[in-house]
Image (cartoon, helix red, strand yellow):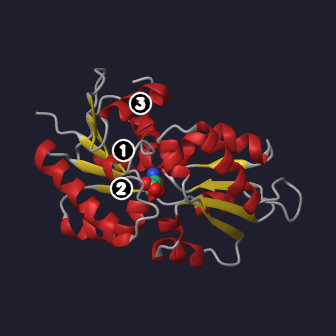
C-alpha cells in the first residue's frame, strides 16, 4: 500500500502550498484536508485551533495512515505545531511560518509589510521570529481580519476591499527610502489574492509566499526517511473537506486545474 502525505489547512488556502508540493513530488500520493466547517481559524483563538488541529491529525493518521504531514496553515502552525510534534514524535512534520527571513534578504529599503491572520500576528512564535531579526529590518505586522474568509468564499468584492484597506494601512509602497518594498503573505489563503495585491502595491514591490520552500523541505524530509515515492506515474490526490466538498473541489479546479 502507498501511504499518502497529509496536507492540512482551515480551508482552501493550503492549496497554494499543495500546488508546490505536487510540483516537487509528482509521484507522491496526497490527502488534502480542508477543515472548512470550522474556518476561518485566524480570529478564533489558540484553544480552538489547537483542538481542531489535534482532531485533524488524528483523523488523517487513523483513516489514511499518512506517512508525513504538512500543516499548510500559518495560524495552526503557530498555535499547535509544537504540540503535534510532541504528541506524534514518529510523524515527519512540516509547518509554515511567515517568510520574514527571506524578506530581509530581498528588501533594499528595510521596510517590510507582513499580512497574516490575527492569530498568527499575536502568536509567540511570530514574536520570537520578529525579535530574532531586530535591527535587520523594520516590519509592519498587519492582522487581516476577514480576508481569509473572503478568499475562502471566493467573494471578489470583499477580497478587493480588504486588500485595499490593509495595504493602505501598511504602505506607502515602492523602492524609495522609507517605502515598503517587500510584502510577506503570512497566510496561505492570501496567495490566491496575489494579482490583486500586486496591482495595489505596484510592480516594484516583491510579494513573498512560502509554498516553494515548504515543498523543498518536505521532499528533503521524505528523502531522508527513505519514504519519497519516485517514478513517472502521477500520485493520487484525495481532497477532503469537513464543510461543503463542492467549495474545495471548485477551488482546486480554479487554482490547480485538478
Ligand atoms: N490559511 C490559514 C493561514 O495560513 C488560516 C486562515 C484562517 O483560517 O483564518 O493562516
Ligand 1, image quadrant it occupies: bottom left
Image x and y of residue 53, in percent: 28, 60
Left or right, 256 with respect to 5, comes to right
Question: Which one is in front, 105 or 241?
Answer: 241
User: Mark 2 and mark 1 in contact (Cβ < 8 Å)?
Assistant: no
User: Mark 3 and mark 2 in contact (Cβ < 8 Å)?
Assistant: no
Residue for point 42% across, 67% down: 78
Secondary structure under the numbered disc 2 in the rendered image: strand
Secondary structure under the numbered disc 1 in the rendered image: helix
Image x and y of residue 93, in percent: 30, 56
Residue for point 66% across, 37% down: 195
State yes or no: Cβ of the residue under disc 3 lies below 8 Å from any atom of ligand 1.
Answer: no
State yes or no: Cβ of the residue under disc 2 lies below 8 Å from any atom of ligand 1.
Answer: no
Q: Which residue was labeled with disc 1?
A: 219
Image x and y of residue 36, in percent: 35, 46
Picture quarter with the C terminus = top left
Cα distance in 3D space between marks 1 and 2: 10 Å
Q: Sequence order check: which comes first, mark 2 or mark 3?
A: 2
Left or right, 52 with respect to 251, comes to left
Q: Sequence order check: which comes first, mark 1 or mark 2?
A: 2
Secondary structure under the numbered disc 3 in the rendered image: helix
Task: Let me know if residue 210 appears in the view.
Answer: no
Mark 1 Cα-neighbour bin, 10 Å: few <14, some 14–19, many ≥20: some
Residue for point 20% across, 47% down: 67
Q: Residue 94 carries which label?
A: 2
Q: Which residue was labeled with disc 3?
A: 252
Image x and y of residue 100, in percent: 60, 63
Task: Let me know if residue 217 appears in the view.
Answer: yes
Amino acid at each position: 500500500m502507498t501511504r499518502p502525505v497529509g496536507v492540512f489547512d482551515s480551508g482552501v488556502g493550503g492549496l497554494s502550498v499543495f500546488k508546490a508540493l505536487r510540483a516537487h513530488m509528482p509521484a507522491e500520493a496526497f490527502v488534502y484536508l480542508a477543515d472548512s466547517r470550522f474556518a476561518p481559524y485566524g480570529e478564533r483563538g489558540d484553544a480552538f485551533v489547537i483542538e481542531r488541529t489535534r482532531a485533524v491529525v488524528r483523523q488523517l493518521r487513523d483513516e489514511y495512515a499518512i506517512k508525513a504531514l504538512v500543516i499548510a496553515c500559518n495560524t495552526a502552525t503557530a498555535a499547535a505545531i509544537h504540540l503535534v510534534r510532541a504528541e506524534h514524535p514518529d510523524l515527519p512534520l512540516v509547518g509554515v511560518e511567515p517568510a520574514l527571513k527571506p524578506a530581509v534578504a530581498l528588501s533594499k529599503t528595510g521596510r517590510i509589510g507582513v499580512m497574516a491572520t490575527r492569530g498568527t500576528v499575536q502568536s509567540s512564535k511570530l514574536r520570537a521570529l520578529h525579535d530574532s531579526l531586530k535591527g535587520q529590518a523594520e516590519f509592519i505586522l498587519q492582522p487581516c481580519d476577514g480576508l481569509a474568509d473572503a478568499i475562502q468564499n471566493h467573494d471578489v468584492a470583499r477580497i478587493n476591499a480588504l486588500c485595499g484597506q490593509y495595504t493602505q494601512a501598511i504602505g506607502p509602497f515602492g523602492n524609495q527610502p522609507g517605502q515598503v518594498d517587500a510584502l510577506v503573505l503570512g497566510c496561505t489563503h492570501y496567495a490566491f489574492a496575489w494579482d490583486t495585491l500586486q496591482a495595489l502595491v505596484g510592480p516594484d514591490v516583491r510579494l513573498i509566499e512560502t509554498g516553494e520552500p515548504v515543498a523543498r523541505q518536505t521532499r528533503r524530509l521524505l528523502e531522508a526517511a527513505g519514504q519519497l515515492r519516485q517514478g513517472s506515474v502521477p500520485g493520487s490526490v484525495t481532497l477532503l473537506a469537513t464543510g461543503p466538498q463542492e467549495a474545495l473541489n471548485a477551488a482546486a479546479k480554479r487554482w490547480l486545474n485538478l
